[in-house]
Amino acid sequence: MTLRLASSKIFGKLALAGALSAGLISADADAQQKQPSPGSAKAIFGSVSLPSQGPAQPIGFYAKGCMSGAVALPADGPTWQAMRLSRNRRWGNPAMIALLERLSRDAQQQAGWPGLLVGDIAQPRGGPMFNGHASHQVGLDADIWLTPMPSQRMSAQQREDLPFTTMLQKGKFLTVDPKIWTQSHAELLMLAASYPQVERIFVNPAIKKKMCDTWTGDRANLGKLRPEYGHDSHFHIRIKCPPGATACKPQAPVAAGDGCDKSLAWWFTKEPWAKPAPPKPGTPPPKPPREGQVSDLPKACAAVLDTPSVASVAAATYGGPSAASALTATPAAAPSVSDQGLPPTGPVPADKPMQ
Ligand SMILES: [Zn+2]
């Protein structure tokens, strides 16, 4: 009896930790759906392959908007490689792309980080996505892998196949694995937080706790690190509305302080896992949520969809067509890091943007 109780307790914890590390528990189940409904905003924005012509403008809010005049992060740079190219989500506001390139250089020079693996930024005209994210809609959000860039250039297929590596310890509840986590990870996060235009960085609560417990440098920017489930194999950078972006809806600044307080402790309590109260007998079942339409977004987003496209990906690549083709001509000959017996690719965790 005791044995059975103990093992079921352990199983419960393991199951919870497993679900967490796989990103299966999502703050936004809607973001995990397989296919968008035809005619929905997700379906329409997801089917556009090129950005609109015209000046770069973020329109609306991080989790409810779109963008015009996006530019692409080149698939390759000296200090970065863009991942999952088939998703066509390496588009952003030029301010976001410039920051990613700068961070990649500074990280190599200052954080001992060989280069960035860049995940999703946004779709060519932003807007909601059918999987993976609630935000990333206005070109001012970007995901960076917590796996350092390998020394070889990966082929497009290797960039599809490289599994995510969680920073969390298997079988433990919200704990960073000391065998995987390094000082360079910590320095990379604090470097990213150091730029004035960076407003928030989303990391798993376990990673935030690790930073709170171990960061001995200047803690002035630690408050920019925001705990959020998922975000255990990548972190998410959000920058402010750029100057002059009048259609961009800003988010309230983060609270003062390092955030290593009650607001962090909450993520480790039972409260986030509490089941919703059962419906009262006789109550009709709730209607499934209606899928967002283009008309639910700021009015200017319909116009963005109607604007002619730029001529090509290369024409809209940050740094110009030469940057678009700079390094892709020499792909790596051999698989570099995909043979480590890591678990298969998990779903990309959803974001909860309102904190
Ligand atoms: Zn993200």
Image (spheres, grey):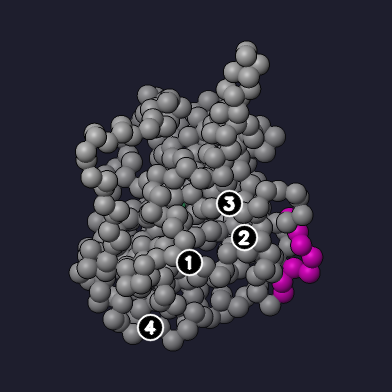
Q: Name the residue carrying label 3.
A: 346
Contact between marks 2 and 4 (CB within 8 A): the answer is: no
**Camera-nearest label, 4 or 3:** 3
Q: Mark number for residue 89?
A: 1
Along the polypeptide, which appears first: circle 2 or circle 3? 2
Q: Note whether 41 is above or below 33 in the view shown.
A: below
Q: Note whether 299 is above or below 236 in the view shown.
A: below
Q: Name the residue carrying label 2.
A: 79
User: Can I make out residue 2 in this image?
Assistant: yes
**Camera-nearest label, 2 or 4:** 4
Along the polypeptide, which appears first: circle 2 or circle 4? 2
Could you tell whether 320 is left or right of 305 in the image? right
Residue behind label 3 places its C-beta within 8 angstroms of ligand 1? no
CA distance separating discs 2 and 3? 25 Å
Along the polypeptide, which appears first: circle 2 or circle 1? 2
CA distance separating discs 2 and 4? 29 Å
Is 205 in front, or is 219? 205
Q: Main secondary structure of the magenta part?
A: loop
User: Can I make out residue 211 in this image?
Assistant: no
CA distance separating discs 4 and 3? 33 Å
Along the polypeptide, which appears first: circle 4 or circle 1? 1
CA distance separating discs 1 and 3? 18 Å
Residue segment shown in magenta: 330-337
User: Label 1's element?
Assistant: loop
